[in-house]
Structure formats: structure tokens, C-alpha cells
Image: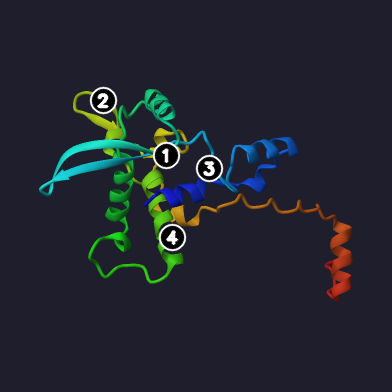
Amino acid sequence: MYEPVIVATYGVWRAELELTPEQDARFDRHGMPQYYFPVEISYAKVVKVREGGRVVAVEGEVVLGSEEQLEEALAESEQSETINTSFVERCFGRQRQFNARKKRKAYTFSKELSFHEACTWLVVLWYNFGWCVRTLRQKIQEEPPRYHQRTPAMAAGLTDHPWSMYELLCCPLYPPKEPPPKKARTYQEVLERLEGSGVEAAP
């Protein structure tokens, strides 16, 4: 299900690699495809074995990459020790929680793809910049307990306060260009401007 999307997102056409003639000939000998998937990426999936409608075993299966890459990635991870879908499922659950367009068996589905994408990214921004996560709070006082609430963006050092919806919607995507510096007008220039407009200057 996810394999075509992952390949389309991270893959690159062979013509875009800017290979030298020697590299191109060598890859031809090894049967390199026209659409290249980076070897640095490993993708695995969780397979649930069911018997009688119940899950009796959970196994991992490498789809893209190698077993060695997968073991190395798990060894370097600070969160996971085995193949799992907890992070992606948490992401999906969060989207369904905040975005009514993605709820199951509801009439609030999106009628246009552009609105669907806009709401999806709004949820991503709100969760990271506006939603204070309980597990990220910092205790600042023991008795009585007092906490400093933090958003994921605050924990990552990207901001120093939770953003309001107004701030999210009004924040420019790109920094505005600085206006050209205004020239300091002299009294003589003001007089010339008044003479040109037909207005008499005060004596």
C-alpha cells in the first residue's frame, strides 16, 4: 500500500543523477532501472498473522533495502527496538482527532483535494506549534506542583511560546521584503513640491 508512495516520494529518475558516461555504462551492466530508489533508505512493514479472526503473531518484513540496513537503523534509534507502526498510527489518529474531514463514517469528508490538503497541513502546524502536549511539560515547582506547558515546537527549540490560531494563520510564509529607505526631504524640496501643485506656501 505504501510502497508506491514511498518510491515516488524518495525515488529519482536515472537521468537526474548526472552520471558520467563511465558510471552510466557500469550501471547498465548491473541492470540499474530508469527510476532509482536510494539505497540508503530501508522500508519495512508489519505483518499480522491471524488465526480464527485473532492475531497470533506479529512479524516484520523488509520491503525496500536490506536486513543489515534495518538492523543498523534500529540500533541507532532511541525510540524503537523492533519494526512497528506506532508512530505512523499515532500520526493518523492525531489527524482524525483534529480534522473532521478524516473521520470514519462521517459526512464531513472533503469535496475538493485542495481543501483537504490545506486542512491537513493546518493540523500539522497546530499540533506542533499550538498544542501543549502533556508528556512534554516541565515541572518548575514541587509543592504545590507547577508545570511549564510546552508544544513540540517549543521542545525542539523552534519557538518560545504556544502559538494561537491567529498567529498560525497570519504568519507570512516568507519574510516580507524591506521597504526602500525613505529619503530625508529638505525644506527647499517641500517648497518646490508645493509650487508644482499650485499651493501657496506660508510666508
Q: Report, in whole angstroms, how far the alpha carbon at label 4 lies from the one at label 2.
A: 42 Å
Mark found first going from the N terminus, 3 or 1: 3
> 154 or 191, which is in the foreground?
154
Viewer-side label of 3, 4? 3
> Of helix, strand and loop, which one carries label 1?
helix
Viewer-side label of 3, 2? 3
Q: Report, in whole angstroms, how far the alpha carbon at label 3 lies from the one at label 4.
A: 26 Å
- Disc 1: which residue: 153
Q: Amino acid at mark 4?
A: Glu
- Disc 4: which residue: 117
Number of residues whose C-alpha sits closer than 10 Å to that of mark 4, classed few (under 14), some (14–19) or many (20 or more): few
Question: Residues at badges 3 and 1 in contact (C-beta under 8 Å)?
Answer: no
The image shows residue 146, relative to residue 91, as above or below, that is: above
Q: x, y percentage for residue 64?
A: 44, 39
Q: Report, in whole angstroms, how far the alpha carbon at label 4 lies from the one at label 1.
A: 21 Å
- Disc 3: which residue: 37
Question: Residues at badges 1 and 2 in contact (C-beta under 8 Å)?
Answer: no
Q: x, y percentage for residue 194?
A: 85, 69
Q: Amino acid at mark 1?
A: Ala
Quarter placement of the C terminus: bottom right
The image shows residue 147, relative to residue 180, as above or below, that is: above
